[in-house]
Image (cartoon, rainbow, N blue to C red):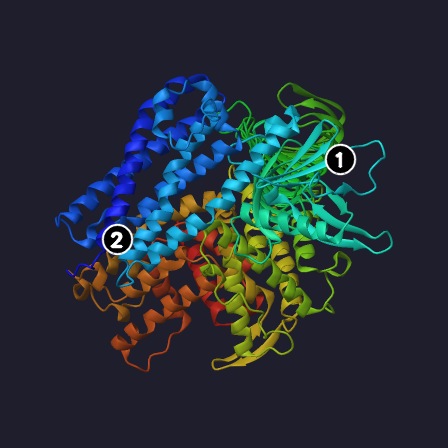
């Protein structure tokens, strides 16, 4: 490696200077630094003096390494590039800066004087600098301390000269520039420290609590006059600007403002010729004025520069309006004593941030104009944790509140209380008190329609509420399976109502509580016989009958004549849920059934909801990618507004399918909420008498959803009409059934199908028994028993030894078994048609390609396929299809397939075994 030529006198001079400084520092270390370390324990500046001692030693160690390295280079033991000062300039700069910053801190708090009083200065130190210490200064210990502690930084200009002399190939330009930049600012920093020291010494002790080693005075209103606008004649205002705070003194009181949360604006009042500065802060805005424009400019630039430095934005032209900072509120109100850390905009909390109160309450989330607004999470030790929407410092919108006792409310809020649609879970299955409520709320109380499932008592109430009490029409199912329907008042079933027992006994008449007959009514026995008159009492304790008439009946009445008429009607259910949706989409409540609304404006509201949901998801996950469930939903679709053809209809189908599957889309959120409400109502402990209610409610929900969809796609036909569109397969009839049932029924299928199975329980037992018996037979025997024509299987010998999966009708059997994996009537009908379609090519292979089915041949063969398919709960499947099948399909091919399967089921039930 080439070694640059170094002038011998330059190298020697610098080496001697460094050696002299190290020798001095070693003496100072022994006679001053060590003494200070021992005596510092009880000092008011203990930490500061510890820092100066530590950094002094570090500086000394660096010099020792430099001397060793320079001597090695002088003796040709290392190359030029391995000289420590050249190779590790960043480490050197760090050491120099650390020492200098602590040194300035010592100066600013008059630390040299404190040190001189804390320890005794040995005479040996006077002799060390006898050439600089005059007779007058011999007893000035403070001067001696300052001399020795300032001495290390005096080597830096000499270091620059040395590096300039050896920088022959200009390889050290960057190194020299860094050290020069550091040294050039030292003089100013020393002046600032001295200025601050003088300020603390001369101002008095009433602001000593503000004295901190790293705090520097920038200016004050004594040297730069500034007053409070419209101040009282008898008030005294004094202003101090430090490098991190702005202090407003009023008499003996002081108000301290962090510079990171101050916004300064210049302003001039032409009429009064006052030169004003407006200081905006989180809790107040003050107007200050100066007598001269030059002083105003000085203050303005000083404050702007100090604020930029406090924000670490010294290179900016001006402090940013939007910034991060921390502030503790002191004024009374919601924010009193809370500390905010986060984003600010022009002295207002704006954007993301965190609020912490001394009592442990913590809010993390979004802010707007100094208020909790947007999505956020609040933890309150006395209440619980709320996560959701906020407005005006209160829960407003959708959110989840998890109480400290683990109860959970999930739903809508208004002014901090549950309001609208919501779900409350109290306790757990092992607790003494556990329940689920889903429904309407007003001001934190159950009001409107709702469902309460009491886990402990086993009672389920479905009906209206007022102020947390059952009030109005409703029904109750007890843990014993007794069904009540009627009018409630103050939690009590009273007046005309009905009661149905599981054994078929039922009563219609006056009631005074569940199970308590109280007046005129009719009690019908399981046999159909009934007693009519004045009945009082309960079935458990006995019924007193007055003026009663017993009537023998041969027509068994399974249900009271008013069944289903005394409970809440379907058009009164879940009103709050739909109301919120209409408000979200901007559909006026009074015109929600109209079709003359601006579809484009509604779509814009949908886009706003999707945008907000997307931004919230991105904020929470930190991922800027669009959520997968919003793919192709983030644009307003241009189709379905005016014309509807087969292409447009399929586009509408595809869009709705994706929308219903997305929790971010308003339609997806609505379907999720309504299906949750439906499942809570009819799931859990199911009762067969709820089936009719469940069917009617689902029909109503479907029509309501369709009304909403027509606001988005006005080209769709009204719910009570249908239109025909041309397709490649011919004509397709479009109705709300064909559009929505395949999409939404899977969401409601589990609780609904459970009710169907309860209704068909007895039929299912007979069906299973017959299926098990018939499937014990061989294929030929079963076919013969079911009257399948021999031409379809010829002889038993032809089928002997053939594996089941190789049977000629195996594909049809396997296909029909897929009926259980579908959840909408149309899908089930298509499975049936496909199963029949599997039979035709097989039969044509046996009987010829020209063979055409007739019902006499088809029915026995299909009955055989049904038996071998062993479809569980087939009666319930048929019942489900019967109630929700598109009426347009009943007279077509799919309708015939459905009728055939239904006939097969009836044939199986009629078997006498």
Residue 237 disc label? 1
User: Which is nearer the eye, 641 or 858?
Assistant: 641
| Separation (CA) of disc 2 from disc 1 | 107 Å
Residue 305 in the image, given as x and y percentages of width and height: 59, 50
- Looking at the image, residue 172 lies above or below residue 449: below
Residue neighbourhood size for the residue with mark 2, other residues' Cα within 10 Å, grouped as few (<14), some (14–19), many (≥20): few
Q: Is residue 341 left or right of residue 233?
A: left
Tell us which disc is closer to us: 2 or 1.
1
| Residue drawn 56% across the image and 33% down it | 197
Residue 780 disc label? none
Circle 2 SS class: loop
| Residue drawn 40% across the image and 42% down it | 97
Name the residue at the right extreme. 271
Indicate which disc, 2 or 1, sits on the residue closer to the N terminus.
Answer: 1
Residue 724 in the image, given as x and y percentages of width and height: 59, 77
Q: Is residue 84 left or right of residue 605?
A: left
Which residue lies under the disc numbered 2? 777
Q: Is residue 84 left or right of residue 183?
A: left
- Looking at the image, residue 823 lies above or below residue 643: above
- Which quadrant, please, contains the N terminus? bottom left
User: Which is nearer the eye, 747 or 329?
Assistant: 329
Image quadrant where residue 65 sits: top left
């Amino acid at each position: 490696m080439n070694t640059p030529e170094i002038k011998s006198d330059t190298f020697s001079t610098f080496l001697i200077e460094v050696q002299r400084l190290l020798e001095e520092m070693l003496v100072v270390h022994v006679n001053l630094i060590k003494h200070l370390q021992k005596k510092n324990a009880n000092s008011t500046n203990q930490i500061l003096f510890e820092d100066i001692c530590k950094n002094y030693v570090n500086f000394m160690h660096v010099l020792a390494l430099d001397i060793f390295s320079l001597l090695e280079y002088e003796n040709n033991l290392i190359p030029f590039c391995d000289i420590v000062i050249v190779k590790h300039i960043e480490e050197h700069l760090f050491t120099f800066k650390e020492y200098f910053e602590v040194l300035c801190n010592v100066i600013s708090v008059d630390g040299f004087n404190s040190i001189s009083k804390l320890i005794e200065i040995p005479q040996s130190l006077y002799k060390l600098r006898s050439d600089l210490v005059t007779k007058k200064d011999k007893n000035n210990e403070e001067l001696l301390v300052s001399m020795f502690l300032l001495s290390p930084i005096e080597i830096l200009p000499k270091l620059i000269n040395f590096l300039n002399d050896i920088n022959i190939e200009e390889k050290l330009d960057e190194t020299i520039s860094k050290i020069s930049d550091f040294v050039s600012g030292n003089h100013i920093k020393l002046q600032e420290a001295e200025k601050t020291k003088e300020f603390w010494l001369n101002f008095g002790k009433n602001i000593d609590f503000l004295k901190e080693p790293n705090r520097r005075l920038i200016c004050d209103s004594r040297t730069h006059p500034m007053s409070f606008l419209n101040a009282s004649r008898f008030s005294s205002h004094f202003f101090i600007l430090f490098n991190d705070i702005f202090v407003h003194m009023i008499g003996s009181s002081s108000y301290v403002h962090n510079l990171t949360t101050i916004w300064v604006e210049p302003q001039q009042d032409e009429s009064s010729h006052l030169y004003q500065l407006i200081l905006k802060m989180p809790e107040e805005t003050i107007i200050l004025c100066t007598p001269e424009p030059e002083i105003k400019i000085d203050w303005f630039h000083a404050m702007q520069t100090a604020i930029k430095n406090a924000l670490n934005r010294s290179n900016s032209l001006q402090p940013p309006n939007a910034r991060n900072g921390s502030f503790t509120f002191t004024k009374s109100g919601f924010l009193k004593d809370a500390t905010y850390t986060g984003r600010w905009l022009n002295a207002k909390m704006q954007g993301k941030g965190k609020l912490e109160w001394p009592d442990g309450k913590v809010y993390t989330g979004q802010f707007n104009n100094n208020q909790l607004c947007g999505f956020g999470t609040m933890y309150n030790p006395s209440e619980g944790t709320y996560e959701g929407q906020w407005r005006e410092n209160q829960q407003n919108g959708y959110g989840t509140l998890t109480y400290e006792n683990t109860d959970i409310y999930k739903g809508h809020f208004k002014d901090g209380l549950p309001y609208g649609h919501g779900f409350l879970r109290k306790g757990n299955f092992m607790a003494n008190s556990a329940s689920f409520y889903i429904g309407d709320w007003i001001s934190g109380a159950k009001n409107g329609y709702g469902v309460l499932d009491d886990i402990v008592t086993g009672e389920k109430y479905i009906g209206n509420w007022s102020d947390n009490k059952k009030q109005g029409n409703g029904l109750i199912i007890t843990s014993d399976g007794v069904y009540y329907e009627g009018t409630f008042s103050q939690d009590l079933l009273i007046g005309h109502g009905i009661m149905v027992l599981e054994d078929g006994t039922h009563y219609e008449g006056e009631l005074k509580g569940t199970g308590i007959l109280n007046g005129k009514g009719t009690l019908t026995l399981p046999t159909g016989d009934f007693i009519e008159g004045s009945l009082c009492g309960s079935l458990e304790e006995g019924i007193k009958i007055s003026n009663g008439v017993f009537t023998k009946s041969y027509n068994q009445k399974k249900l009271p004549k008013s069944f289903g008429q005394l409970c809440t009607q379907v058009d009164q259910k879940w009103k709050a849920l739909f109301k919120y949706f209409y408000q979200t989409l901007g559909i006026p409540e009074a015109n929600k059934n109209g079709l003359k609304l601006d579809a484009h404006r509604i779509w814009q509201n949908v886009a706003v909801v999707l945008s907000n949901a997307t931004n919230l998801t991105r904020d929470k996950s930190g991922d800027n990618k669009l959520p997968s469930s919003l793919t192709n939903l983030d644009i307003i679709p241009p189709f379905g507004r005016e014309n509807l053809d087969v292409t447009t209809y399929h586009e509408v189908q595809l869009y709705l399918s994706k929308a219903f599957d997305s929790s971010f889309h308003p339609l997806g959120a609505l379907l999720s909420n309504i299906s949750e409400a439906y499942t809570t109502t009819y799931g859990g402990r199911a009762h067969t008498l709820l089936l009719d209610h469940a069917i009617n409610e689902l029909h109503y929900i479907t029509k309501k959803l369709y009304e909403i969809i027509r606001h988005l796609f006005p080209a769709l036909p009204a719910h009570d009409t249908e239109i025909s569109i041309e397709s490649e397969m011919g004509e397709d009839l479009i109705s709300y059934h064909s559009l929505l049932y395949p999409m939404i029924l899977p969401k409601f299928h589990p609780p609904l199908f459970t009710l169907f199975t309860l209704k068909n329980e007895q039929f299912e037992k007979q069906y299973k028994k017959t299926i098990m018996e018939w499937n014990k037979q061989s294929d030929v025997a079963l076919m013969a028993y079911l009257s399948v024509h021999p031409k379809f299987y010829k002889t038993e010998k032809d089928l002997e030894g053939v594996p089941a999966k190789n049977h000629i009708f195996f594909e049809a059997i396997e296909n029909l078994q897929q009926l259980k994996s579908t959840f909408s009537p149309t899908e089930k009908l298509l499975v049936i048609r496909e199963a029949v379609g599997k039979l035709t090519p097989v039969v044509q292979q046996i009987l010829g390609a020209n063979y055409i089915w007739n019902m006499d041949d088809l029915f026995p063969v299909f009955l055989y396929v049904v038996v071998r398919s062993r479809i569980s709960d087939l009666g319930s499947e048929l019942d489900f299809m019967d109630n929700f099948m598109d009426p347009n399909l009943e007279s077509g091919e799919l309708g015939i397939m459905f009728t055939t399967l239904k006939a097969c089921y009836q044939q199986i039930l009629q078997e006498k075994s």
